[in-house]
Amino acid sequence: MTEPLTPAIGDTVPLGSFLANVHMFGVVSDIDTPDMMSFSIEGTAGNAVMMVRALMGPPGPAGQNAPILKLQQPIYDDDDDLPSNLTDDDVDVGKFWIVREFDEFGNAVSSKAWVWYGTHFEPFPMGTQGPVGPVPIINFSFELLDPDDDDLENEVIQTGDPYHPSVHLKLKAPRGPQGPATSIANAPDVDMTNPPETGDTLVFNEATNKWKPGSTFAYIPKFWTMPEAAFVNVPLAISTSVPLGSFVVPPLEWDCVPYVQGHVRITGVELDADPLIIGVQVRLGHPTSGIVVARGFGNISTYVDIKPHFSTTGAPNDATSPENERGKIVAGSTGAAATLYVSAFNDGATGIYHFEKRGAQLSILAIPI
């Protein structure tokens, strides 16, 4: 094993190394008594400062005096109007004239001082630099013209003020080659989450604001019948209204109005001018207070034909239409809101009724609205 050497006085011993940003400064000193130290450096972490002596030399020769500026009159609007008979004598050197500058519309926007230097003029901008001016907010719009119409030309229409101009470009751009037809299913306003089935067409979904596949058959009128088994026999009843049966319209995907027809046989006695003529009514939503959608007026044959009817003695102006939606069954309705109630009725006093369901029948047609 080699024994370590003991350094002697004057030896340089490496202590380590590091990267540093060195900042150098010169210290002014007298040329006759220069500092004998070549330089000094101080370092901390990654930064170091190096100090060296900068010797001051003797003064240089005197510079040339600048001319005294002498403002002259008049103020010119063009530098071509400046005098051309000036000399290099002190009486002329330093004379200057103000020359205004104009924009393309003839507005004075700046000025310069033209100084005579004995052989030529030198222009200097007058004043100090001003703040940055406002930047206009420009709105562009485009309109493509028919390239095959010879009466049309490219046109640029500018409106608004200088700070808020609007530029409308009418461009007669050449027509390019016809591209391939796009796929409707890939259009951004078409929702194909549910794949289409045979016979589907595009229908609009207001909730998503998109088109989607849908069957037009879903919106055609639906037809049902209420068979005699759905009615109930009433051997003997005393009232102004006697329930004869009910029918629940199945839930639909759209609003509808029921178109009700049918026939029943009913007998009895009423305390009115026609004691042997008994009627039938069909109400929606409630047996006695629901909306009347059909009625049948009795006759001496005791057979009652039921047809669409929406008014009553107390409300002779009631009628249905696509606008007023009277008698409407809301889409998806169930329970009483979609139930048709059939009753024997008497507009006057209490009557005595006898009803047999044999042969009774109703037909219900749901008409979309």
Image (spheres, grey):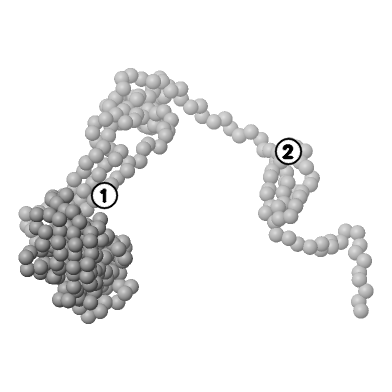
Q: Secondary structure at mark 2?
A: strand
The reply to whether residue 150 is visible in this rendering is: yes
Q: Is residue 168 left or right of residue 45?
A: left
Residue 183, given in percent of the width and then of the height, sits at: 24, 74
Residue 45: image quadrant is: bottom right
Which corner quadrant of the image does residue 69 belong to?
A: top left
Residue mark closest to the camera, 2 vs 1: 1
The image shows residue 326 at horizontal and vertical percentages of 19, 56
Residue sitting at x 25%, y 56%? 289
Q: Residue furthest bottom?
A: 198
Residue 35, position as x, y percentages in the image: 78, 42
Q: Earlier in the sequence, mark 2 or mark 1?
A: 2
Query: Which residue in the structure is indicated by mark 1?
Result: 140
Rendered position, 166 above or below 183: above
**In which quadrant will I find the C terminus?**
bottom left
Image: 367 above or below 31: below
Q: Residue at x 73, y 36 (%)?
A: 30
Number of numbered tags placed on the structure image: 2
**Amino acid type of the residue that numbered disc 1 sits on in the rendered structure:** Phe
Q: Quadrant of residue 147?
A: bottom left
Q: Quadrant of the N terminus?
A: bottom right
Of residue 82 and residue 167, the one placed in the foreground of this image is 167
In the picture, the disc for residue 228 is: none
Question: Tag 1, which secondary structure?
Answer: strand
Q: Nearer the viewer, residue 112 or 144?
A: 144
The one of 103 and 270 positioned closer to us in this rendering: 270
Q: Residue at x 91, y 71 (%)?
A: 4
Q: Is residue 149 found left or right of 356 in the rendered image? A: left
For disc 2, the marked residue is 29
Q: Residue at x 24, y 31 (%)?
A: 106
Q: Is residue 67 left or right of residue 157?
A: right
